[in-house]
Amino acid sequence: MSMPQGLPCHDAVIVGAGFGGMGAAIQLRRMGYEDLVILEREDDLGGTWHVNHYPGLAVDIPSATYSYSFEPNPYWSRLFAPGPELKNYATHVAEKYDLRRLMRFDTVVEGAAWDEAAACWTVTTTAGEQIRGRFLLTATGFLSQPKMPDIPGIDTFAGTIIHTADWDDDADLRGKRVAVIGTGATAVQLIPTIAPEVAELTVYQRTAIWVAPKIDYRVPRLVKTLFAKVPLTQRLMRLGGTSILEVMMVAGVLHFGSLPGANRLGAKVCRNHLEREIKDPELRRKLTPDYSFGCKRPTFSNTFYRAFATGAAKLETEPISHLDADGIVTEDGRRTDIDVLVLATGFDLWDTNFPAIRIVGREGRDLGTWWRDNRFQAYEGIAIPKFPNFFSLNSPYSYSGLSYFTTIESQMKHMGRLLGELQRRGASTFEVSAEANDAFLERMTEKLGDSVFTLGSCATSRSYYFNQHGEATLLRPTSTVNAFREAGSFPLDDYRYA
Ligand code: NAP
């Protein structure tokens, strides 16, 4: 990448205008950096909550927890808010913190390279534009590159194909024969929502998902007023939600070996839910996961099982052989004619998303190549040796807990401590040392030894928590309390300053 002369070097370039990118911008502002540019490939802000608008979209983490702690929203309509409210919340945050004017939409970033001489990053867009920044922050999300299934004959299908991450709001499913491929968290929300309006709904499940009941309700006006007038009450609610997730995810999944009871509890809650909802033993067997609770992200729903129990949706577990112009043929030779094929097939994390753009650091180190040749790794899930002034917000071991906001806010804290030290020293660059990075990787690898990923039975789970080498390098295998503590207390000498 050639290094352009004469372009201004902004304080920072942030890639991604979702909640991660906006949190990073708010933190940079708090640290006194005002000259920020936020580049976004979509035509508006909100990240996943802008892109996703499939029927039934809602947050599946309680909303008091799935939001910034410093920007509580007392007005969520439900305990688990519907998707459009999350998009509105993102807009509200952008306006309140005056972030929109920093954003450039429809700007697809191709790559970024460190300019050693100028101590500045050069970011290049697919349109050929170059934008420079002293700090580079990638907030490109984990679930941002939709996965298209490689099913023979899919391109010969004559009907409509819709991926859930590219939902066509004009698509009219009423009276149509619809097939859904996938039973992840997205499909679990979509299936019961579209089931009542379609003529036929066939769901192709390859791997069953653990589903917990969703204790959801409309928030009464009185409670909203209470949250607005006495914010402490909503903070307590947040603490409650966060604690339940901590027990399920952190104790039950990450400390599987030392706290096996928490995992058993999570599995039992889901199994009881299934047994209550599905009476037919054969259907129940098909919907029962054959891998340990937590190997794959579990989800919450009161209506998913009911869609099958009532016959509104038909479960198909025979593997798909191929598609033709009229529909889907399974391996046993049965065919189902359909009008619309819905791909709830999720996202590609490990091939196209780590990192989502080409990033070249010092001495020509290419991050994607280096991760693939040397294991996926990032010090405290945020920094990588030979990448000065770079915050990689969607890194291996960065995802902490179950609510993404835990990750965002612990990373904001890490940024605050590091940038504070940089300023105190009057330095202009930081870079994590290889030794600190190695020690962190070793520690995370050791901690994974206690997790369900190592000790449980995950072989059949097909979970995106595992990378292509079979290592569970997505989640930080510690409590969220530990993540926050370390973000505010990591040894400052783990970085070099110049
Ligand atoms: P996902 O969990 O990766 O699920 C994709 C589904 O498609 C799986 O059931 C998968 O089966 C199936 N699939 C993929 N390729 C297939 C193929 N070639 N043939 C047959 N089946 C195939 O994706 P997702 O449901 O979109 O959810 C992704 C994540 O988004 C969730 O885990 C969650 O973190 C997040 N999410 C959050 C919310 C929320 O409310 N906060 C809502 C929705 C999603 P296999 O398992 O066999 O591969």
Image (tube, rainbow, N blue to C red):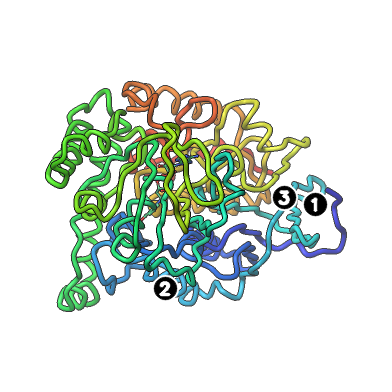
- Judge by depth and name the residue closer to the eye, 334 or 285: 334
**Mark pair 1, 3: CA separation:** 18 Å
- Judge by depth and name the residue closer to the eye, 268 or 45: 268
Instruction: Reply above or below: 339 against 151.
Output: below
Q: Is residue 51 left or right of residue 368?
A: left
Callouts 1 and 3 close, C-beta under 8 Å? no
Q: Position of residue 23 (x, y in %)?
A: 48, 60
Residue annotated with mark 1:
118
Does label 2 or label 3 sit earlier along the sequence?
A: 2
**Mark 2, secondary structure of its residue:** helix
- Occupied quadrant, residue 246: top left
**Mark 1, secondary structure of its residue:** loop
Residue annotated with mark 2:
88
Q: At label 3, which amino acid type do we have?
A: Gly
Q: Position of residue 426 (x, y in %)?
A: 64, 52
**Mark 3, secondary structure of its residue:** strand
Instruction: Reply above or below: 101 against 303.
Output: below
Packing grade of label 2 (10 A; few <14, some 14-19, many >=20) is some
Residue annotated with mark 3:
111
Q: At label 2, which amino acid type do we have?
A: Asn
Residue located 27% across and 27% down the image:
256
Does label 1 or label 3 sit earlier along the sequence?
A: 3
- Judge by depth and name the residue closer to the eye, 86 or 139: 86
Residue 439 visible in image: yes
Q: At label 1, which amino acid type do we have?
A: Ala
Packing grade of label 3 (10 A; few <14, some 14-19, many >=20) is some
Q: How many marks?
A: 3
